[in-house]
Image: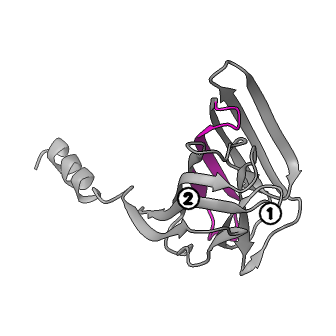
Amino acid sequence: MSPLGAARAVITSSADFGKLELIETKTISGTVAQVDFTSIKESTYNVHLLMLSNMLTETDGKRVALRFFESGSIETASVYQFANFVLEAGGSQANVANTGSNTLRITDNTGNDTGESSNTYVYLYNLGDSSKYSFITCHSSAITSSAVGVTEFGSGVLPQTSTVDGIRVLGDGAINLTGGTMSLYGIKE
């Protein structure tokens, strides 16, 4: 076999790498304070993908955020850090950052009238690796309470080594969630 033929055999034998494997889907019906994913298969996957569709908050102009469970206990202290960029269709833009937040910000303020919701994808890294920090990258699109399209992207980190074994989706600022579908995937290595 030629060197190129051998390389092709190696490349094609790893075709499953990067494949998304569904762990769990949850749909909000009614009003809830948060949604928890507690069986995230953190020892199986080094990278997870969380997809949030048509997320609605009870209060107008609020965000959707994340928290992590560390060895079964939710981390609520102001230890999370994030840096995001927000761009509205009207042309306004802003850098938002925090080095002492009690959540990871993943969306901008969203409206709660008909048609006003947010959609987000979040990549989560190193959750089950107790020797590394757990961090995210995210990108969202939404309609604000003033009926303007907005996009936000950025990253965040839990800057302490721990085994993250769960994810909480919640409304930022102790507001309730009233709709949306969330799917958590593991990415095969």
Considering the numbered disc 2 on the image, is that residue within a helix, a strand or a loop? strand
* Residue 73 drawn above or below residue 3: below
Q: Residues within 10 Å of mark 2 (few under 14, many from 20)?
A: some
Q: Which residue is mark 1?
A: 160
Q: Is residue 92 left or right of residue 188?
A: right
Q: Which of the numbered marks, if any, corresponds to residue 180?
A: 2
Q: Position of residue 7 (x, y in %)?
A: 23, 47
Q: Position of residue 20 (x, y in %)?
A: 39, 60
Q: Amino acid at mark 1?
A: Gln
Count of labels in the image: 2
Q: Position of residue 146 (x, y in %)?
A: 70, 32
Q: Is residue 184 left or right of residue 157?
A: left
* Residue 76 drawn above or below residue 105: below
Residue positioned most to the bottom: 72
Considering the numbered disc 1 on the image, is that residue within a helix, a strand or a loop? loop
Residue positioned most to the front: 114
Q: What's drawn in magenta, residue-wise?
A: 122-147
Q: Earlier in the sequence, mark 1 or mark 2?
A: 1
Q: Nearer the viewer, residue 179 or 49?
A: 179
Q: Nearer the viewer, residue 9 or 165?
A: 165
